[in-house]
Image (spheres, coloured by chain):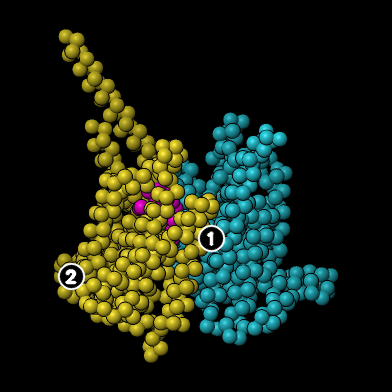
Chain colours: A cyan, B yellow
Amino acid sequence: MFGQFFQTIFQADFLFIIIRITAPILFAALAAVISEKAGVANIGLEGMMMITALFGFLFAYWTQSWVVGVLGAMLIGILLGLMMGFFSFKLKTDIILSGIAVNMLGTGGTIFLLYMFTGLRGNTGALVSPNILIPTIDIPLINKIPILGDMLSGHAILTYLAFIFVFVMRTFLYRTPLGLKIRAVGENPNAASSVGVSVIRMKYIAIAMSGALAGLGGAFMSMYYSQGWNQGMVAGRGFIALAAQAMGRGEPVGAMFSSVLFGLAQAMKTKVSGLRGMASYNYLIEMIPYVVTIIGLVFYAVSIKRKARRHQLRPIKEKLQ
Amino acid sequence: MRDKRMVLFGFVRGAAAIALALAVGTIFIFLSSDEPFTALKYLLIGPFVSFHGGVTAFNTQNFYQVLAAMIPTIFTGLAVCVMFSANQFNLAAEGCVLVGGFVGALVGIYVNMATGWHAVICVLAATVVCGLIMLIPSILKVKLGASEMVTSLMLNFVLLYIVLHFLNYHFADRSKGATMTYPFLDSAKISSIVPGNSKLTWGFVIALVISFVIWVFMYRTRWGYAIRMIGINESFSLYSGMNVGGTIVLSSVIGGMLSGMGGSLEVLGRYNTFVWRELPGYGWTGVTIAILAKNNPGLVPLAAFFLAYLNKGCQLMSTHSDVPSEMIDIIQAAIFLFFAAEQFLSGYRQKLVVKTTREELMKAESLKATEGE
């Protein structure tokens, strides 16, 4: 069984699947990173992805253009972010609670909205057509390289965008004035405010960007990954992304690595459940990504604790020497 | 004087939040439905009034059904109250309800014992197991500082798949078309307290009693005080010598026990076999109830009643008109947002405070004047 297991794992198509599965988690993880940098815990990501996935698909269907769909999903994401911001920054609803409210809209509200706009119940299977799905692209030259080509070429445009955004985000946060202001607001709002940075405005900007990124993740899910919208589609990816953000220490590159780890766990799930003799363990295999997330969080928490202890001990040790 | 006005203000604010949420719901009904007035009629008064043959009468069975629907949500509402009071955003009540129901069902099927105590043992087993489950997120939080919110969310999925695994591969009744367990023994079932098919069982009475018990616990014991104090100011509690870690674990374990109890009472009262194949959603309703009740266990039954009424209204609306029952989630989210908004109607509150203070000052001055004479 293990021989068979390793045979399936070490194949170019397995690595291809990892990258494909990682992309939506990565978008959501980046969404978590940007809002967390401004000190806003956005737990509404799950709902945001559900809603933007639905609207992205609907916009694409109405206009028969995937570009409009993706942009529409981002727009809806931004609006959801601003709505959360309005309730939390203006009306002082706890940000966790406005996140839960968005998640509620995501689970039941989407079914209602789908029915309201199309008369369909539960999924959009009937509306799918090739020109509203996000196209894949073959990268010239790289697709000629034997294994690497199979792995890296032929992904959807948004998949590449997700990985590019990691570095865009890092540059934005650490090399632009706006990024600096957002980080300052997250680290010490009073200090930021004392030098004339509008704390509320930065938080609005951060959560709107977070919404836009969640929108990209949602659009990816409904317009590429599962080819149509259905109710259980996001399946906790928004929550996993929160864990990826925490495990990646809130940094874009760190979040990317932990997203890939969760992508790996999900890909394992799909691969292992296909093996002979594993059929009666399919539910336990479904569990893998979530268990990996909890274990990852524990490791992260332990390392943070150790680091904090070292920081505390250092001055004492220096005195002793 | 000030207190009275503030209590009144609290009620006005709550009513305004609910009215706004219903208004949002109404807008959506008018947008989506061809027969909005039928839909609204069933949503708002459907649960209590039957319209058969042009005669409007009080509908007792529907009323019982609304009360029956409160059984699991009172328990999850209480669970969330206790955990949120300690400022623990632990959302694993959802998974615990499922596990509680499953454990209760298993004990109800496979443990054969004397009538009378069987149901009690089922519920207690579920309670204990779910209390133990809650040790996972709370100890990870206290010992390592891992966010209880994320771990509990992940834990819900883990619990779901564990239950599905055992349900499908170990305890399924293969003679049935759908996946379900063997039927519960009669001695394990929770019996109804009213005639008819409403499933209003003794679980309802237990829920009310437990609400009172938890209220006493939270407001009249030192452990309850410690839990609330940690929620208000954790550093203060730490410096004043409270066992903060232990209390946080305690609050989570109580939350888990309550959820498990609710899940088992629901399953043993409503069904003949265990049929849940996904997370039942009562944990999330519990969060809404805790928000509506402002974390006060005494108000939980009231909030649970309101939501059960609304839910029943939505179901009736979807049967009798073209509006889907998922409408409830939109209304719930709106209630949630407005109700939890501290600054909602804050201008009005400010005016009230100013007015009250002015009156008090005037009174004090006139008192001084009379003393001076």
Label 2 resides on the chain identified as B
Q: Is residue A1 left or right of residue B288?
A: right
Within 10 Å of disc 1 (Cα), the crowding (few <14, some 14-19, many 20+) is many
Measuring 26% from the left and 32% from the top, which residue is drawn there? B2
* Magenta residues, start to end: B81-92
* Residue at numbered disc 2: B193
A244 and A64: which is toward the camera: A244
Subunit that carries the residue with mark 1: A
Q: Find out whether residue B179 is within the magenta segment.
A: no
Q: Where is residue B338 in the image (x, y as percent from the top left)?
A: 38, 49
Residue A139 visible in image = yes
Question: At 23% from the left edge and 78% from the top edge, which residue is drawn?
Answer: B114
Which three-letter amino acid code belongs to the residue tagged 1?
Phe
Above or below, B341 against A247 in this view is above
In this picture, residue B226 sits left or right of residue A155: left
Disc 2 marks a residue whose amino acid type is Ile
Residue found farthest to the bottom: B175
At horizontal 69% and vertical 47% (from top left) the residue drawn is A172
